[in-house]
Amino acid sequence: MLRYANPTKFLALSRALRPWLAGATVLLLGAGLALGLRVPPDYQQGETVKLMFLHVPAAWTAMMAYGLMAAASLVGLVWRHPLADQAAKAAAPLGALFTALGLLTGSLWGRPMWGAWWVWDGRLTSFLLLLFLYLGYIALWNAVEDETRAARAAAILALVGAVNLPVIEFSVQWWTTLHQGESIVRAGGPLIAGVYLWPLFLMALGYTLLFVSLWLMRIETAILERRARTVMLEGG
Amino acid sequence: MVFRDLSFAVEAGAVLSVEGPNGAGKTSLLRMLAGFLAPASGTVRLRIDGTALEDGEERGKQVGWLGHHDAVKPQMTVRETLAFFAMLHRGAGALEGAMEQVGLARLGDLPGQYLSAGQKKRVALARLWLCGRPLWLLDEPLAALDPAGKRVVADLIAAHCAAGGIAVAATHEPLGIEARRLVLA
Amino acid sequence: MSALLLRDVRLAARAGGSAMLALAFFAGVATLVPLGVGAELPRLARIAGGVLWVAAVLAALLALDRLFQADFEDGSLDLLALSPLSLEAVAAIKASAHWLATGLPLTLLSPLLGVMFGLPPRALLALFVSLLLGTPAVSALGAVGAGLTLSVRRGGLILPLIVLPLLAPAVIFGAGAVLEVLDGIPNGALGLLGAFSFCACVLSPFATAAAVRLNLGS
């Protein structure tokens, strides 16, 4: 594992893996969509239930991205490894993107179901807060000028956020019970039928691999960018 | 990287004058000795009573620091400023004596905002004396001071070292006392 | 330890300090709300807990970017780091001083504003207690943000972006405590708020100290 913490070895491994990951992503997302579009309409939600296959995996991936970012931050902070710093930095915009995708599809899904583009439902609200956590992290990275210091500051923020995230999640759930007017139909949970399970599973795996492929690509770019900068500095 | 292959030792009672052009890394060297900065490679070791302190933060607790900035709050009087640091260092005794020593005896009740740069430097010197740390790290201790002020610096360093302390000063001009020189290129 | 606390509170209370500013901001925001949403007292009472909590959080954040920056710029922070206090203690004390200078005065003023929002006496008490319990968490988590943005030239601009999402639980439970009284349905908000605040106050100084430490290495 630690052998691949060397940037050169990481580049070689990442380049070898990426075509396979990309291929698997396309296959999984294709299969997931094909299956997902053919599921029978839900008795309550009708055809809109199919949006679940785009929404729920996006939300999962956004959460997973934060977890990976926090894990990379911890490694960067404890072992002072630049590759981990880059990995954390590279995960943030992707996490923000998947969070935004989750919010967007959630809003589209909510329109026919709740009759409004935005409802302060527990899941959407906590994802809005997650989006702000990502944006704060990205802003901090960009604001601190010295790169090593930016990496450490951002890592501390990611860890504080990771500790606080479950509390935020809990408080938002608590809040929805406090203000409940209409009872909200929640996706997921035990009432999900088997026909929906397979496409959901395929899509979730597809989203995950999509994230991993893009993540690896961003880390590669960051490494190459650093090298280019060193070459330019030495050449100039 | 500012400097490399730097190796030196200072014994108790000695003064080291660190010299070199702007940007040679004098301030960085002092911050490294104080433990703010970790050297990219190598170690800084402070030996006190037979124990060697290598950890930056432990070493910092033995350091008397005189930096570029004087840490004098405009809203606090000279006496308040010094009393605060004396309390922080658990020794409020010699407050008036320290003010006398640096020539601030009559300015005790003046808020920091009315002090000149040289007077603020004297407040910083009094604080350095009050804190009673064995290792003094001084960044341009003579800057902004008049000839009388410069003599105060020399006297303070001499008294500190006579009591077995160490002083390392980054400076552009002679300190006015006998010192070993370390020139950074 | 008390020396640093006393100094920071004094600096905040003197001319140019942040204590009065925060109070004025708090009252100002609370005055604008009825102008914006209308003056019917029943409706104002319903939203009072939430509005005053949001206003209190914003007021407390107002001066937060200077918490370490002022000491950083004039060299005091170097001396504090070299003092017998650990950086963790410095972080905890400075956050406490911030609370004494902003959170506590805001809490003391809140019943007055609550009356103007038409809150019944028992709800006033809930508002007061919730702010008393919850504003320390605002100072503690805010200090983390202040430490992280210490070397950022315009740190005050990104500080709220960093800190506000972390404070969502405090606002939710704090406003919930007022609703508990208004609705007469027990919801345990104060207990949850207390637990959140306690954990924030215990854990934050470590993150704050780590953030300050990395900024001293310059």
Image: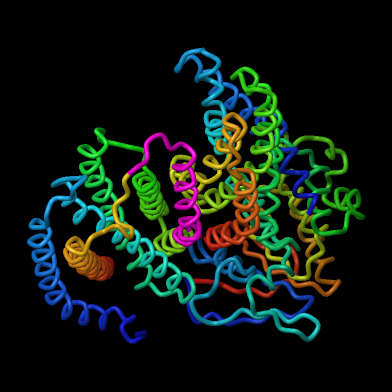
Quarter of the image where one finds residue C12: top right
In this picture, residue A88 sits left or right of residue C156: left
Residue C117 is a magenta residue: no
In this picture, residue A209 sits left or right of residue C163: left
Name the dominant secondary structure of the magenta segment: helix
Residue C17 appears in the rendering: no
- Measured as percent of width and height from the top left, residue B56 is found at 63, 72
Q: Which residue is rendered at x = 57% and y = 31% of the image?
A: C183
State whether residue C59 is above or below residue A206: above
Is residue B118 or residue A218 the one in the foreground? A218
Quarter of the image where one finds residue A190: bottom left
State whether residue B63 is above or below residue C135: below
State whether residue C185 is above or below residue B185: above
- Measured as percent of width and height from the top left, residue A194 is found at 21, 64
Residue A166 is a magenta residue: yes
Q: Quadrant of the N terminus of chain C?
A: bottom right
Q: Which residue range is magenta in the image?
A: A157-184
